[in-house]
Image (cartoon, grey):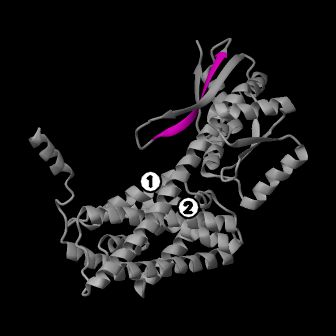
Amino acid sequence: MKLLIRKLFDYINLTKGEDDKSKVLDNVKVNISFRGANLWILACAIAVASIGLNVNSTAVIIGAMLISPLMGPIVGAGFGLGTYDFELLKRSLKNLLVATIAGLVVSTIYFYISPFKEAQPELLSRTSPNIYDILIAFFGGLVGVIAITRVEKGNPIPGVAIATALMPPLCTAGYGLATGSFKFFFGAMYLYSINCIFICISTFLIVKYLDYPIKKQLDEKIQKKVKYYISTVITIVLLPSIYFAYQLFEEKKYQQQIDVFTEKEFNNKGITIIYKKTQFNKSPKILELGFLSKRFSDAEIKELNRSLKDYELNNTKLVIKQDTTDLKSDILNEINFNKSVLSQKDVTILNLKKQIAQNHFDNNNLLAEMKILFPDIQNISISNHTFNEKTDSIKTVPVLIYKSKNEFGKPELDKLSQWLKQRLSKKEIELYRQK
């Protein structure tokens, strides 16, 4: 048993492959500075990320995150906390502030002069943090600091830069300033702050776990004072972070229960919801709903409010918008305030709808037209089929299966094929007769 435990510990032992601690600290200190080239690189990365958000290009945003040096001062702050190095902590926070201000200035200028100010889905997704953002920042930070402390750095650092996504929320905050939308600004800065804090916390934990030496001061009184200050900073960082994490977890759980409530009480009964808005931070919490055609009596609304407790939606008030004028006004206000109501999910749904529309054929209309030209045809079925899957020559071709009184000869088949290509605007089509 002891041997098994020893082997298990050997597998998870972080001290194996660890780089010299003084060398790691030197590298960390070098990377926290934002002067000269580093500041120019940051400014260019911010500009690239802002363009990516503006044109809704994920690839461009990822590229900007890879060249961004923003992780340096955050990791430096974590090392400063872990080693009680007050000077390192001060330098790191100062440089992080410089980097943040520089990022806000560059992104604000870009979005101010850009003629395209529509909020794209990539931008909208950076305006409100959730519990998953905390988990990504924390575990991404763990990976990053573990890689930094290795002799063989490997390739996790670029992945950490992409996963923790410090750059996009900072650019989104700049967009908020440029367009005067403080909802965007504060939401994005909240996400940016959460990312910074949890990367810093994960760095601090690894530094303590690897037992990096505490920086010694010449005077014992100064040593005690530094320890006191650092301990205070750690408490100030940790306690609100735990609260933020708890709040975001509760909000996520609350939203899930709302989804269950609306699904069971309305969607499953064929009642279409066209407007939904939640106000989680109010007391009582507010759930506003608007419906396509269904109208509820006062008794039904009271009963629905009572049923909220069955779905663990305590301290919540259900408000049903039934006045069409008010409902239209609320929907229009929501659209105008956000500039765009499209989220990444909405865009995905629209793309899927387009694909479905492209793949859908009106069999009834086609059959009616076809019978005029080819009276022998009795019935048809047409749909897209994919050929050569799992190969480089994959193609999608419409396939028509038809039922006819008599079998067509080659001239008639060619005529039918040419007509269908013209009618459906397709270069290729397959024909098969049902026997």
The local crowd at label 2, few if under 14, some if 14 to 19, many if 20 or more residues have their Cα within 10 Å, is some
On-image quarter of the C terminus: top right
Residue linked to disc 1: 135
**What amino acid type should be assigned to the residue bearing mark 2?**
Ser
SS at mark 1?
A: helix
Asked which secondary structure carries label 2, the reply is loop
Residue toward you, 394 or 137: 137
> What is the spatial separation of the Cα atoms under label 1 and label 2, in whole angstroms?
25 Å
Depth order, front residue of 56/6? 6
| Residue at which label 2 appears | 57
- Residue 5 against residue 16 in the figure, above or below: above
Question: At which x and y percent is residue 118?
Answer: 69, 64
The N terminus - image quarter: top left
The residue sitting at 68% across, 37% down in the picture is: 424
- Stretch in magenta: 394-403
Residue 318 is left or right of residue 252, and the answer is right
Name the spot of residue 214 as percent of width and height, x first. 25, 74
Q: Amino acid at mark 1?
A: Leu
Residue 109: x and y in percent read 63, 79
